[in-house]
């Protein structure tokens, strides 16, 4: 039993002298839902296109199923892509679109017809065989694009921001749809998005990328709860990122107040970055809090209240709470030890991008 | 209320005047081609005689054949070369693409007489004797830019991603082109062909300079005949040319509308 289905080894790529990927290593397990997440220009789409064969890496290897496929053209790779802009063939009917890959492989007609029926059923568009592509909604077109890819029974499905062009409600529906598809098909999904919520909802593994480097790789819970650096913490969800000093193991100094935490091994009196999620801050009576501040902003968000609490040094803490504290009220700030995430402080901007790769 | 009515009437009168200016001469030509009298200002009764004479004349029929063969071959070859060129240009980076398209547009704006003379000089300089083949080469030359110009917009609409999708589904690059890209740009290719065909039918100046002795297309024949005095059979010939171009234009318009609706 092999460990991984796809291995990217020391992949580097630059366009016009601009480095897009720098010595990227990534291994993807069989039957997983892996999401490459990052802001635009972080190299996530390029990574996907290198796996798909549309872009050749300048150096490094793509290992698929134990074989080096770095120089194989896209049509020889046993994986299929769902493109952001659907890329359906406008002059063909839906059935012809779906049958495209099978016809090329000279499959018998009965087999193709069966497959078309099966695929349309799988994407909830039964009976759409002879409709015109151009009359479908965006969501339907994307489902056809998925159907067209999966009839070829690829081992891996590459999805390049497939929900990017859809509206919010449809996007949420399609997220569940994709999870269901993934479970029914039992194949590996590699998904590219800049939408952190999409990534958190669907993935087994999230790979956070920035400036051509992998910042952190882990389960959605790990990425959210234990971000390894300020970039990841900031990109995934809202957070308070504060420069602090690690006094000793399990004790951190934030704005002169000592907070108990659970992290060890950073050394004594070392500058660190601290991440505290807004929903992990408890607002209490001033005398019970570790720090004291005043509520300066209050917005009702539906599920919770969003507040800004300004402490004496002028820092504005973002707090989410179902309890409301009016503007001007003095409150105490208290955080449970395991809700404080300590990160090494990057010493330069370069290191900020690289540091976590090691 | 009354103003808008007046405006409408004035607008219609204006339109009628424009149409008269544009089509009265052609209508005169068509009518004269059916006039049994040789006079240009007396109606002698309706006749098909001039058309009969036209088809009996060996020189006119030879010129007619030359014109059609050259128009068809030059349009076909220019369409192939132009489409391939458009594919290449479309994949260029922005700056070279703009440069090449500018170079492509110059021959179309260039005066025909300059193109004609320079082609003639070119042929002579390289020792190519003037004749059918030089006309054909010249027509291919001036047709290519028109084909490129009508294929390019279609290529721009066709997203590169559909080509990649075809590759992704297992198609070789050639299959992906013929099954996915070509059907998409086909309307542009066809209109490029028709445009090239009409440009070739239409051409006089370039043909005149590159044809050499002993061969004529309709336009060069008409030109040499006119110098000897116009025969009414030439009205008939001109009417046929006008009719052909008109039909081609209508066909290409209908075809494009149909494709758009689809």
Image: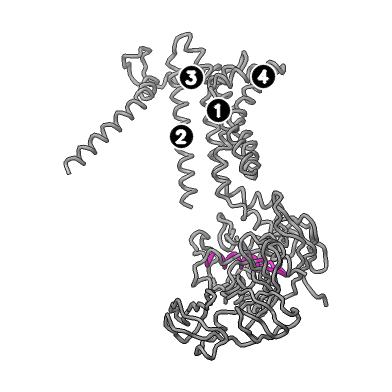
Residue A354: % across, % down: 73, 65
Which badge, 1 or 3, comes first in the chain's sequence? 3
Work out whether residue A184 can be spotted: no
| Mark linked to residue B200 | 1
**Residue at image mark 3:** B54
Q: CA distance from mark 3 to mark 4?
A: 35 Å
Q: Quadrant of residue A98?
A: bottom right
**Residue at image mark 2:** B247
Q: Are marks 2 and 4 in contact (CB under 8 Å)?
A: no
Q: CA distance from mark 1 to mark 3?
A: 21 Å
Same chain assignment for discs 2 and 4: yes
**Residue at image mark 4:** B122
Q: Residue at x 61, y 83 (%)?
A: A257
Which badge, 2 or 4, comes first in the chain's sequence? 4
Which badge, 1 or 4, comes first in the chain's sequence? 4
State the residue lying farthest toward the top: B228
- Magenta segment range? A139-158
Q: Are marks 1 and 3 in contact (CB under 8 Å)?
A: no
On what subunit does the disc labeled 4 rest?
B
Which element type, helix, strand or loop, lies under badge 1? Answer: helix
Is A137 rendered above or below residue B146? below
How packed is label 2: few (under 14 Cα within 10 Å), some, or many (20 or more)?
A: few
Residue A302: % across, % down: 44, 80
Which badge, 3 or 2, comes first in the chain's sequence? 3
On what subunit does the disc labeled 1 rest?
B
Residue A286: % across, % down: 50, 88
Nearer the observer: mark 1 or 2; the answer is 1
């Amino acid at each position: 039993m092999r460990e991984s289905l796809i291995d990217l080894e020391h992949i580097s790529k630059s366009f016009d002298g601009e480095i897009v990927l720098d010595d990227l290593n990534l291994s993807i397990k069989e039957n997983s839902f892996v999401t490459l997440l990052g802001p635009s220009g972080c190299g996530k789409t390029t990574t996907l296109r290198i796996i798909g064969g549309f872009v050749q890496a300048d150096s490094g290897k793509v290992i698929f199923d134990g074989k080096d496929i770095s120089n194989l053209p896209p049509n020889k790779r046993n994986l299929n892509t769902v493109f952001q802009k659907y890329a359906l063939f406008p002059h063909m009917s839906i059935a012809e679109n779906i049958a495209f890959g099978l016809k090329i492989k000279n499959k018998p007609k009965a087999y193709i017809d069966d497959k078309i029926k099966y695929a349309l059923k799988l994407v909830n568009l039964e009976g759409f065989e002879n409709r015109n592509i151009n009359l479908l909604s965006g969501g339907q077109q994307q489902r056809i694009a998925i159907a067209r890819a999966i009839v070829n029974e690829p081992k891996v499905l590459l999805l390049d921001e497939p929900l990017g062009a859809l509206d919010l409600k449809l996007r949420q529906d399609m997220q569940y749809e994709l999870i269901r598809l993934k479970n029914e098909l039992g194949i590996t999904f590699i998904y590219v998005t800049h939408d952190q919520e999409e990534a958190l909802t669907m993935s087994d593994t999230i790979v956070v990328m920035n400036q051509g480097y992998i910042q952190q790789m882990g389960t959605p819970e790990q990425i959210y709860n234990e971000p390894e650096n300020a970039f990841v913490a900031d990109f995934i969800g809202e957070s308070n990122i504060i420069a602090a000093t690690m006094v000793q193991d399990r004790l951190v100094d934030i704005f002169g107040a000592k907070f108990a935490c659970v992290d060890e091994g950073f050394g004594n009196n070392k500058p660190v970055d601290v991440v505290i999620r807004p929903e992990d801050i408890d607002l209490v009576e001033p005398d019970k809090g570790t720090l004291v501040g005043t509520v300066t902003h209050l917005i009702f968000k539906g599920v919770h209240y969003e507040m800004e609490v300004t402490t004496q040094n002028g820092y504005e803490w973002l707090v989410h709470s179902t309890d409301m504290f009016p503007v001007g009220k003095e409150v105490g700030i208290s955080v449970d030890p395991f809700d404080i995430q300590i990160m090494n402080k990057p010493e330069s901007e370069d290191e900020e991008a690289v540091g976590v790769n090691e | 209320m009354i103003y808008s009515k007046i405006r409408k009437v004035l607008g219609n009168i204006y339109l009628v005047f424009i149409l008269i200016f544009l089509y009265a001469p052609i209508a005169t030509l068509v009518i004269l081609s059916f006039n049994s009298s040789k006079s240009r200002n007396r109606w002698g009764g309706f006749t098909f005689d001039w058309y009969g004479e036209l088809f009996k004349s060996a020189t006119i029929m030879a010129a007619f054949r030359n014109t059609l063969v050259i128009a068809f071959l030059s349009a076909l070859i220019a369409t192939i070369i132009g489409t391939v060129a458009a594919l290449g240009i479309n994949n260029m980076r922005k700056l070279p693409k703009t440069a090449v398209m500018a170079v492509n547009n110059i021959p179309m704006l260039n005066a025909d007489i300059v193109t004609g003379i320079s082609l003639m000089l070119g042929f002579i300089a390289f020792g190519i004797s003037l004749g059918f083949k030089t006309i054909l080469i010249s027509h291919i030359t001036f047709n290519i830019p028109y084909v490129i110009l009508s294929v390019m917009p279609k290529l721009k609409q066709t997203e590169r991603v559909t080509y990649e999708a075809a590759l992704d589904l297992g198609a070789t690059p050639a299959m992906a082109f013929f099954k996915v890209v070509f059907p998409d740009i086909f309307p542009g290719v066809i209109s490029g062909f028709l445009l090239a065909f009409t440009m070739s039918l239409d051409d006089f100046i370039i043909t005149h300079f590159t044809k050499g002795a002993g061969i004529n297309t309709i336009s060069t024949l008409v030109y040499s005949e006119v110098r000897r005095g116009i025969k009414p059979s030439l009205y008939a010939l001109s009417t046929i040319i006008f009719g052909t171009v008109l039909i081609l234009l209508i066909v290409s318009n209908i075809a494009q509308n149909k494709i758009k609706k689809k």
